[in-house]
Image (tube, grey):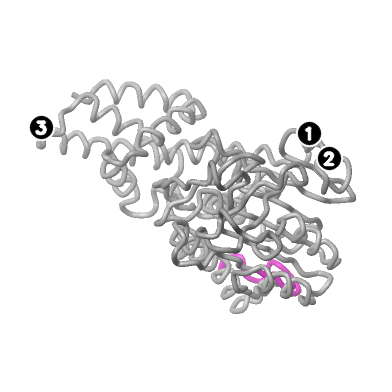
Amino acid sequence: MRHPSFSLFILLLFAAGGLLGQAKTLHVIYNINDHQQDGIFQGCQQDRTNSEELFSTIGQLAREMDMGIQVKEHPVQFNKASITDFLTNLDPGMDDAIVFLFSGHGMISDNRSRWPLMYYCQEAEFENFNAENCTLSLKWVHDQLKAMNIRMSMAISSSCNNDPFTDGNVEQLRREMREHSSGTTEGGEGHYNFDLFTQFNGHILASGASPGEVAYLNDDLGSYYINAFLNVMIDGLISDKATTWASIFKKTNTTVNNIKPDQKPQFLIFRDNRNSYSGELTGKYDDDDAELFGFDEADFSKEWETAFEIEEALEMLPYILVKALIDQVSMEDTENFDFQAERIIAFYDQEVLTPYYFDYAAEDGLAQYYCEETVLSIQDKYFNEDFELAMELFPLLPEALRRRVAAFVDTLR
């Protein structure tokens, strides 16, 4: 996936200015590991950078364009006392929304909770930490936000949900958040899903791992779960198709799990006095509020989800083309390899981006960027994982395009 184009996102927000009505406040609380000695420090800080860039952009444009929502960002010191004091004293308006983002270590709470304990002390204290001072339940944060009687809240944790002494390792993933397209359709105006923040009523609880699992991250791009969530959320906000939070979190989970089958994120949405849960409904934990239910079809936006999957398949297609190239042409044959690589760029631009996703192709050099980045990643240890994901997504593409790809691959000699 590619990094989101925030400059493009800004232009889209300008275009949507004035559509949202009277201002509401979106409070964004960053609770990010800042222990420089910890192995996950750089990755967690990247989560903060990525999140701040997105929400600061939304806030800036909201002010300049009177878009009906103002953003207040709250970076809270990374310790249990600070976050509990902050949440206890926060006094939002009834029509406000709160997003709580935690990035750090986490651990399982035996059978007491399906949600992780957020860990605030240093890694060096793992073996002899004081739970009273070092851990706080993500579920407690969710309950605290619900008790404020606000319109909307999210409590999101990208952390492990297991025993840190046995499985608490982090693994580097070299994955990029993908470039996002224009929110307008050809010949018409775009539909902007900012009602996700301004009109939604309910409370969301989400974690990057289910009980007994790890959550992966890397130093360069942050945690895979936060990257995926921001990526999918931006797509939902600027899409020309209406979507829902259930669909956004569902696709976030799928994006993570496609690459890391041993990491299965989970989410719960409390709405209309009903707890809808994404995971297995078997088993009971001590802090479950009430009976959990599965989601109904009406909770999701199938049209948006299908469009999202096809878009992702189009973006990942260069991995299939480049894999065919390196399988059939020696990299030592520099002249022929470069010639065939240029043919791939031309094919991807003319046969894929332009006819199937015109607004991607409108950005000069995008096909060359995607393909060259894929070639450069050949030696990356995650190249094969990306290729496997591309192959999983390939059947989603139109049959006519799949046939053209197969025919083109046969010409790479």
Is label 3 in a helix, a strand or a loop? Answer: loop
Query: Who's the residue at 63% across and 39% down the image?
Result: 212
Asked if one can make out residue 304 in the rendered structure from this viewpoint, the answer is: no
* Residue 18 painted magenta: yes
Amino acid of disc 1: Leu
Residue tagged by mark 3? 333
Amino acid of disc 2: Leu
Q: Residues within 10 Å of mark 1 (few under 14, many from 20)?
A: few
Q: Position of residue 8 (x, y in %)?
A: 47, 62
Compared across the picture, whether 245 is left or right of 405 comes to right
Asked if one can make out residue 114 in the rendered structure from this viewpoint, the answer is: yes
Q: Position of residue 282 (x, y in %)?
A: 79, 31
Q: Is residue 160 placed above or below 328 in the rendered structure?
A: below
Is label 1 in a helix, a strand or a loop? Answer: loop
Report how far apart the C-alphas of labels 1 and 3 lie in the structure.
Answer: 56 Å
Residue tagged by mark 2? 292
* Residue 377 painted magenta: no
Report how far apart the C-alphas of labels 2 and 1 lie in the structure.
Answer: 7 Å
User: In the rendered image, which quarter contains the C terminus?
Assistant: top left
Residue tagged by mark 1? 281
Amino acid of disc 3: Asp
Asked whether disc 1 touches disc 3, contact meaning CB atoms under 8 Å apart, the reply is no
- Mark 2 and mark 1 lie on one chain; the one further toward the N terminus is 1
Is label 2 in a helix, a strand or a loop? Answer: strand
Mark nearer the viewer, 1 or 3: 1
